Image (cartoon, coloured by chain):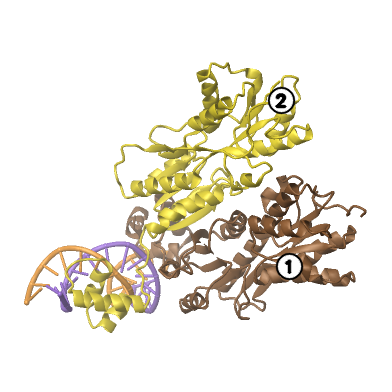
Chain colours: A brown, B yellow, C purple, D orange
Amino acid sequence: MTIAYIAESAGVSVPTVSKVLNGRSGVSDETRARVEQLIHQHGYRKPPKNRSNLVELVFRELESMWAVEIIRGVERVARKNRIGVLVSEFGLHDTSGTTIEDTVGRRPRCVLSVAQLSEAERGQLRARGIPFVVFDPIEELPDDVPFVGATNWRGGQAATRHLIGLGHRRIAMISGPDHAFCLARLSGYTSALAEAGLPTEPRLVVRTQLTREHGYEAARELLSRPDRPTAVFTANDMQAVGVYQAARELGLRVPDDLSVVGFDDVPAVAWMDPPLTTVHQPLAEMASAATELALALGRGEELSQVGLEIATTLTLRESTAPPKEQ
Amino acid sequence: MTIAYIAESAGVSVPTVSKVLNGRSGVSDETRARVEQLIHQHGYRKPPKNRSNLVELVFRELESMWAVEIIRGVERVARKNRIGVLVSEFGLHDTSGTTIEDTVGRRPRCVLSVAQLSEAERGQLRARGIPFVVFDPIEELPDDVPFVGATNWRGGQAATRHLIGLGHRRIAMISGPDHAFCLARLSGYTSALAEAGLPTEPRLVVRTQLTREHGYEAARELLSRPDRPTAVFTANDMQAVGVYQAARELGLRVPDDLSVVGFDDVPAVAWMDPPLTTVHQPLAEMASAATELALALGRGEELSQVGLEIATTLTLRESTAPPKEQ
DNA sequence: CTGAAAGCGCTTACAG
DNA sequence: CTGAAAGCGCTTACAG
């Protein structure tokens, strides 16, 4: 299927078909209509040029429960722009490292990276003129690196205020590693306590990993103390699942004996027993915003702001209640 | 960046560079090495031809909890073949329906469709010579349509045998709509009962939707009967979540008062209380197999078998126990 | 092994 | 508005 063939079918010259295909002027409406009809009929598409019609969405690992939400958010705006979404996994930090090269070789319109992008990788993309946006960055980035995140600090604050409002005073926080977003969530907790005139007790803050197992371990220890906390706020939902398990083993009922608030609002958390109150991260919206931003960068638009945070909201379910009289 | 430029840098002619790029013979090792070095150094890639380096993975809706596993499975083999994975959502059955055309326009090497592909859509793809594989088909397909599924019948049989082995006699099944895979799971259940000399009691089989709410409703009714079943097998995990909820409300403990077996083995089911015994669908393996199949079809290989089912396995956790003496 | 020449699919500049 | 001609990036067939 060549334009020569289309030209012949339409009884016009090759340059005329070329003009129609490229939306150039200098073709009569009638001729244009006839040629367009033939192009459609034969399903002719011009061979993709140097730049593809693709957004590349890169995950470090594709196992998190968030992944689907993120993909959906990207898909939504890509679809509107008639652009395809290419999903690729890790390799970014591999030393075997063909992956960033693969990505570059695919010449995507832009790349969206979930969680990180090393300086070298950013350099590679920049050298090829491929714009990128970092999604939910885990580390501080230079000022000129575009990113989209969530309002983690405000989320931590909202969760803690909710517990304080219920009457809790001994509120523990199980937090995560030194990632930017964990620090922000922790700081939101601290700041809500301060605002209520409560001290941040170092004994009530545990820094651990963001897994169910680590949440479980931390909660076992915290809840075995004589002056155990009456509420626990965790840095993510998986940790909260671990807290539930520890509470169960210790014969503590949620929320009667212990209030729990998570962070992320992963779908599965709505069917726990009891359903978990948690800070909702609007992953799909964040992903859509990141895609819009990356596409705008790809169009060469000059943007005043190059990073943004989308608001989190507290999803109230059944894992929190006032503390029992003691 | 043109091959003419590479040729000049390397001090050779344009045809020589062309040969190196296309792995043709007739170039000395020394020249080849020099040219390859320059190609790499300048990051030259040949412009994509009529056929892209993409597998397109089409979802009807991207919200199921399986999606990530499927994407990972596809990604794994695509990556090995240095092919990108393009994920697209629905629109396939839209009447606005630009989507199948978008897909065709992207000229993927092959398409993998999760759940369905209408006859018209199959026709469109065939007309363009784009091979496709249907993943986990929900309806009977003509014999020449390639598909990859799971051994649903054997899964239903294994789940039921497990319950029978534990001593259960009144085993209910909450099944789903008339989809091929639901029918197979149900039939596995029936056949395991028959094999143990037990009749299939129509009263113990509920046909409903594959959601948590429908599982809950069905279980409420089933468990409120005077001669309530001592075990329930559900057609998917979401229904089993609903069964847990109904049992809780009715003061029935799992597994002491009621054994529950699900189907799918979605990740979240491992942290339920108690962790759910369920039939594992090897989604990632199925997806990898489907991708291999589609790619083989794309290479024009003649395949003797054009459909296959990957084995399910029963994942034993803590939701089943022998029935209490009655 | 190498590259001049011809050719392919497409676009652009321009004469009619 | 139309298309002959020149040109571009690439490949192929072939002479040396």
Q: Observer-nearest residue: A152 or B156? A: B156
Question: Alpha-carbon neighbours of circle 1 within 10 Å: few (<14), some, or many (≥20)?
Answer: many
* Secondary structure of residue under mark 2: helix
- Name which quarter of the figure residue B176 lies in: top right
Q: Count of labels shown?
A: 2
In the picture shown, does residue B256 fall above or below B200? below
Type of residue at label 1? Arg
Question: Alpha-carbon neighbours of circle 2 within 10 Å: few (<14), some, or many (≥20)?
Answer: many
The residue shown at (72%, 54%) is A243
The residue shown at (63%, 28%) is B322
Q: Observer-nearest residue: A319 or A83? A: A319
Q: Please, which chain is the residue tagged with disc 1 on?
A: A
The residue where tag 2 is placed is B222
* Secondary structure of residue under mark 1: helix
Is residue A166 toward the left or the right of residue B181 in the image? Answer: right
The residue shown at (73%, 51%) is A244
In the picture shown, does residue A91 fall above or below B214? below
Question: Picture coordinates of residue C14 (x, y %)?
Answer: 36, 78
Is residue A215 toward the left or the right of residue B83 in the image? Answer: right
Question: Picture coordinates of residue B2 (x, y %)?
Answer: 33, 76
Type of residue at label 2? Leu
**In the rendered image, which quarter contains the N terminus of chain B?**
bottom left
Q: Observer-nearest residue: A215 or A179? A: A215
Q: Which mark is residue A185?
A: 1
Mark 2 to mark 1 CA distance (whole Å): 45 Å
**In the rendered image, which quarter contains the C terminus of chain B?**
top right
